[in-house]
Amino acid sequence: MADIKVLTDECTGCGTCVDTCPFGAITLENDVAVIGDKCTYCGACVEVCPVEAIVLTKDEKPVQADISDYKDVWVFIEHERGKISNVSFELLGVGRKLADDLGCQLCGMLMGYNVEDFAKEAIAYGAEKVYYIDDPVLKEYRTEPYSRGAINLIRKYKPEIVIYGATTQGRDFAGNVATTLYTGLTADCTGLDIDPETKLLRQTRPAFGGNIMATILCPRTRPQMSTVRPKVMPMPKKDDSRTGEIIRETLGMTEEEVRTKVLDFIKTEQKVNLVDADIIVSGGRGLGKPENFKVIRELADVLGAAVGASRATVDAGWIPYEHQVGQTGKTVRPIVYIACGISGAIQHLAGMKTSDVIVAINKDPDAPIFKVATYGIVGDLFQVVPALTEKFKKRLGK
Amino acid sequence: MKIVVCIKQVPDTEATVEIDPETKTLKREGVESITNPFDEFAVEEGLLTKEKYGGEVHVLTMGPPQAKDVLKNAYAVGADYVYLISDRAFAGADTWATAYTLAGAIKKIGDFDLVICGMEATDGNTAQVGPGIATQLNIPQLTYVDKVTEIDPENKKIKVERLLENGKEIVEAKLPALITVVKDINEPRLPSLFGIKKAAKLDIPTWTADDLPVDKDKLGLKGSPTEVIKVFPPEVRTGGEILEGDIDEVTSTLVDKLMDLKVIK
């Protein structure tokens, strides 16, 4: 078992470790740091201690696989409703960089039924090879056959790294794959790079609603796997003249073995979905009543934007849950986020504060949303928002 | 129906960790612990399922001894049995080792029909433990569930609605199964005074590594494939410009600035 202890003679009781501990596991007792049961051995305190008074010993790990045969970077090519999800292209972009840094190939992992064109598209976006399983059982995404397919491909071809989009699909089955293969999976990464010395994949992700960042390694098992948030990595250029190899494999699972069945799909009425949107216009309690979401929708329509909402408006039943941005709703990262009548509670900020440009419109000059806004307008949203809608209409010739 | 609900104690989201702008360290003063918000929906769904189809609700959590608090809350609203899974050997578990340990506890409870988890926890935000448990138990999983449409205990089937990016998917699975639930699924009830009193007196059973059907090499930090090497504050986003002038001026300025981004077409 790992062990952590405070060298009581060295400890000066400065409290730096108490403030740093992400888990609130350290307290000061008689001016000496005491590490309690909440400790997860993350080592954050060891790093910050100015007098090196905290000693962490991690024992030899039995989780150890023969990792020498593993090579290449794989990207899961996700598709939904007849098209490849944008995040898969973004992953081919970052995957290219990882493969170049490791001096290996970039490959796609594709599953589906009659979707060979997607393999060609993945090649146009930079994949040198695509491993493809074509089977009627894979026609609609389901956890079990997709996990089975991925596990079989990974066991056979031994990729060093596999990355998936942190979408409902990627987050749904990557956990199964990692569990079965007994390897690591880091969720919702916003940064991936290769350590120049160890050649390990450094996976950086936000935690605690974005209040801390953590860098995570998967040193002893393979493949190293991550899910990556959509819209974090830049979109690479498509080049239809690129050529690559398509390697076909079989699924080895029959319909009878699958324990789930998709009965229906009801498409949302939203024109633009929040996660993919480049522009989001969101409304909060300042709207006063449900009908007033009309002013938000009008601006969103002119801008081709998605409509977001604060928790308060969703809880009040003004707008469906699928619109909620924030800790118990969706995490979004558009280029422009326009918050109208939203005060900016910490839970809301957790879901949108990495947007490129944030616009806040609120009549309260002290609203916390202004602390993160790129541009703020202090004023009545019922005057400001319709004025913006009119001006954009004119400017865009609509 | 034997229903098992997995819950987690997390720092209160109302006062979640913040960065001290001067020292660049995390401020944690006055941070209380609460039940992960998504897990409240999981507990409620367990209770609703029991009320509709009969059976019992078992709630478990893995964590330090103080995590008992969240079990007391679950008991106060109506859970039939609660268990604390706690041992220093579990500390430092990543999602792999956490799912492995919880699956061990669920196997010990045994003979279950439905496992319910929250979609994710508000501290780690991984959404990986639910799928990990389903895989360890070799049962089908249905994630992002916003409605349980129907359960057929006779024929061992469950039908649900899953909330996806572009719409809702209606799916059917064989029981036993695991579902992870989103906020929209129900409205958690509040405990009664009687429930709170009953929970206060409850002696909560604690299971350690020795009590579970698990391989001890696969627990805690030791059994975790991933390793956190660095924890650091994000770049602090600072407020920008407050646009000054009358409505016409400020809106014109904003339109210019946003058009310059070349994303609005």
Image: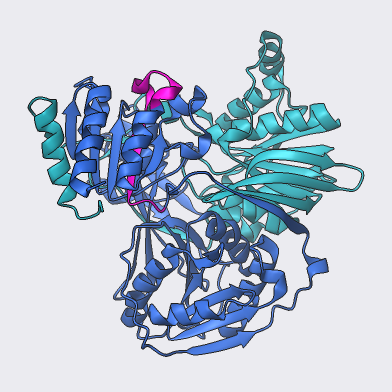
Chain colours: A blue, B cyan
Query: In the displayed structure, would residue A90 be above or below residue A19?
Result: below
Corner quadrant of residue A176: bottom right
Taking the magenta stretch, the answer to whether it contains residue A140 is no
Quadrant the N terminus of chain B occupies: top right
Taking the magenta stretch, the answer to whether it contains residue A277 is yes
Q: Position of residue A377 (x, y in %)?
A: 18, 29
Query: In the displayed structure, would residue A225 be above or below residue B156?
Result: below
Q: Nearer the viewer, residue B61 or A363?
A: A363
Task: Single out the residue that lies furthest toward the front.
Answer: A397
Query: What residue lies at 83% left-to-right and 67% top-to-bottom?
Result: A256
B134 left or right of B110? left
Corner quadrant of residue B29: top left
Q: Position of residue A124 (x, y in %)?
A: 40, 81
B46 left or right of A191? right
Q: Position of residue B111 (x, y in %)?
A: 85, 46
Query: In the displayed structure, would residue A322 be above or below residue A240?
Result: above
Query: What residue lies at 26% left-to-right and 30% top-to-bottom?
Result: A386
Task: Single out the residue that lies furthest toward the right.
Answer: B154
B59 left or right of B56? left
- Magenta stretch in the rendered image: A276-292
> Is residue B17 visible in this depiction of the protein?
no
> Is residue A98 visible in this depiction of the protein?
yes
Q: Position of residue B150 (x, y in %)?
A: 79, 40
B44 left or right of A121? right
Query: What residue lies at 26% left-to-right and 36% top-to-bottom?
Result: A389
Q: Nearer the viewer, residue A258 or A120?
A: A120
